[in-house]
Image (cartoon, rainbow, N blue to C red):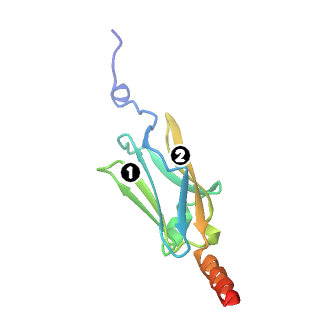
């Protein structure tokens, strides 16, 4: 028999996603976008990161909380990134990353921004020209 020690009893498992990001998320200018990932039980060693176009948003979320909001719900094992008042600069690739000493997993999505204001202005211009 192999002796057990405290380290073996709490072997850290590689994080596993139970709900990934939707591949494409469409939102209109001025709306809020909500991106959510779920994972197996949270371990205190797990580190959660959100990236936008490969750049880590962790510090940005805390500095610019009027633009981004991050919520973690331990009871649901979920992490949500809210992008407030979306504009064309928010269009791009968002990545959820959860990692620990045993490994990591991630989910990636595209945020598409519908410039409905331009569409409405264009439609109004065409209608006025037709009158």
Asked where in the image residue 90 lies, by quadrant, the reply is bottom right
Q: Earlier in the sequence, mark 1 or mark 2?
A: 1
Check the picture and name the quadrant holding the N terminus.
top left
Q: Residue at x 51, y 66 (%)?
A: 61
In the picture provided, is 95 more to the left or to the right than 128? Answer: left
Q: Residue at x 34, y 15 (%)?
A: 3
Q: Which mark is residue 117?
A: none
Q: Residue at x 42, y 33 (%)?
A: 13
Q: Is residue 123 above or below residue 107?
A: below
State the residue in front, 120 or 32: 120
Mark 1, secondary structure of its residue? strand
Q: Which mark is residue 78?
A: 1
State the residue in front, 11 or 6: 11
Q: Residue at x 44, y 37 (%)?
A: 16
Mark 2, secondary structure of its residue? strand
In the picture provided, is 18 more to the left or to the right than 56? Answer: left
Rounded to the nearest angstrom, the CA distance separating label 1 from label 2 is: 13 Å
* Label 2 neighbour load within 10 Å: few <14, some 14-19, many 20+: some
Check the picture and name the quadrant holding the C terminus.
bottom right
Image spot of residue 6 (x, y percent): 33, 28
Image spot of residue 67 (x, y percent): 52, 72
Q: Is residue 125 above or below residue 55?
A: below
Return the residue found at the far left: 75
* Label 1 neighbour load within 10 Å: few <14, some 14-19, many 20+: some
Q: Which residue is mark 2?
A: 107
Q: Is residue 11 above or below residue 114?
A: above
Q: Are marks 1 and 2 in contact (CB under 8 Å)?
A: no
Return the residue found at the far right: 129
Image spot of residue 89 (x, y percent): 64, 70
State the residue in front, 63 or 1: 63
């Amino acid at each position: 028999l192999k002796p057990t020690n405290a380290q073996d009893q709490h072997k850290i498992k590689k994080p596993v996603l139970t709900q990934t990001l939707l591949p494409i998320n469409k939102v209109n200018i001025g709306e809020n976008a909500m991106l959510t990932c779920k994972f197996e039980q949270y371990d205190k060693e797990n580190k959660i990161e959100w990236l936008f176009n490969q750049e880590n948003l962790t510090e940005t979320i805390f500095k610019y909380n009027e633009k981004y909001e991050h919520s973690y719900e331990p009871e649901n094992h979920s992490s949500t990134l809210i992008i407030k008042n979306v504009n064309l600069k928010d269009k791009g690739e968002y990545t959820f990353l959860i990692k620990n000493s045993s490994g990591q997993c991630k989910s990636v999505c595209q945020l598409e921004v519908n410039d409905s204001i331009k569409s409405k202005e264009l439609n109004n211009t065409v209608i006025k020209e037709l009158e």
